[in-house]
Image: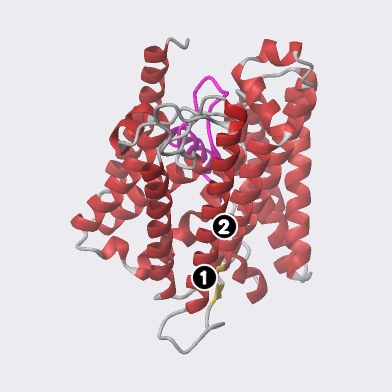
Amino acid sequence: MSGIGDLVKGGARGTATGPAGSPAPRTGSANPLVAITQNLRESGIYIAFVVVVLLFAVLTDGLSLSPNNITNIVLQYSYVLVLAIGMLIVIVAGHIDLSVGSVVALTGAVSAQLVIGSGRPWWVGVLAALGVGLAIGAWQGFWVAFIGIPAFIVTLAGMLLFRGLTYYVLDNVSLSPFPEQYGNIATGFLNGLLGGYGYDAFTLLIAALAVLGYAVSQVRTRIARVRYQQVVDAMPLFVLKIVAVAAVVMAFAWQLANSRGLPVVLIILAVLILVYSVVTRSTVFGRQVYAIGGNLAAAQLSGVNVRRVNFWIFVNMGFLAAVAGIIFSSRSNGAQPGAGNSFELDAIAAAFIGGAAVTGGVGRITGAMVGGLLVGVISNGMQLLNVDQSLQQVIKGLVLLLAVAFDVYNKRRSGVR
């Protein structure tokens, strides 16, 4: 499965040989258009994202790409992206979770009740919210993994159960405000650490280090693929991909540096993306998740403890829902009984639009992040254009439908049922 991070090998032609005199690894096409066509299922989301960003930049006369608006997008949709990470893993395993919006509300309510209602330190609320999220994940994982009730039913019941508990914890009233330390989780910035430039140089430094780390990672992966004689792309496309990613990241960082600096919540999100990218691609647990979603019977015959893996999938989803609940309550500066409504739909949409397969077994963290950002950019752009709220829902629904239709179409072309 190739994606934006896949590496390419260049130059080997004719009678070139690989290690120990064996034939050199087969290279991919040097033509970027051909490579994109060959990997359309995963490349398409990145192309669509760029097109949508440019479209709204034109329609809003550049307002959508202004420093303040880009910062607002990060702050406004960060909790959806956190949920999308967990939802992607759930969907890859062949499940669905309809309860995450209610879990966001309940964890935020517990934190608010302790910090605002009882005057406890802000970090006590954070730890309590995480504990509640883990407990909820274990509860739902038990019913799915060990009792055998389909996740759709378990989480549908959880959506109602945890929403009711939210009303109970808050006594049907909102609680606010949180102390400044808690609010800084979602609204704080690291700014001025390298001052005197007219912009936040620290943000640019962090972005440059991220680009350097990405480039080193891609080169190492490329070398490993060459060593094991795997198919890789040509050198021009390899360089083009790294340059393109670097340009996008640095342009994004430049806009942040000219606004309020590096958002704290972006650091949290970046850490989660890095950790879960490694978990899904380079650990036994991650491979087992894909194996279960791809072919359950084969996974069982291969010795995968399906019950244990499914249990921890939902524990993880509960944890990430709690993180999203903390971020959302921090941004809202309080807890409301109706918080988190439809968040599960946004997370599911992000995963499917980002390339997750309806039948499971396929999907990447980076794809889900781009899918979530795509939904966020569309929503933000329509708000800037003062599009009616009802029409916004129609458009987002059509985007989700087309993304799933694209997945089905690709499966039929490749003969997958």
Please state which amino acid type lies under the numbered disc 2. Answer: Gly
Q: Earlier in the sequence, mark 1 or mark 2?
A: 2
Residue identifier under label 2: 213
In which image quadrant can residue 37 be found? Answer: top left
Residue at image coords 74%, 62%: 125
Tag shown at residue 262:
1
Q: Are marks 1 and 2 in contact (CB under 8 Å)?
A: no
Q: Residues within 10 Å of mark 2 (few under 14, many from 20)?
A: few
Query: What residue is at 51 percent from the left and 40 percent from the top?
Result: 347
Report x, y in % for residue 9: 46, 38
Relative vertical location of residue 386 with respect to residue 158 in this rendering, above or below:
below
State the residue at coordinates (56%, 54%): 216
Mark whose residue sits in front, 1 or 2 = 2
Give the magenta part as a residue range.
338-365
Q: Which mark is residue 149?
A: none
Residue 374 vertical placement versus 257 (above, below): above
Q: Residue at x 39, y 76 (%)?
A: 258
Image position, residue 22 (x, y; %): 57, 25
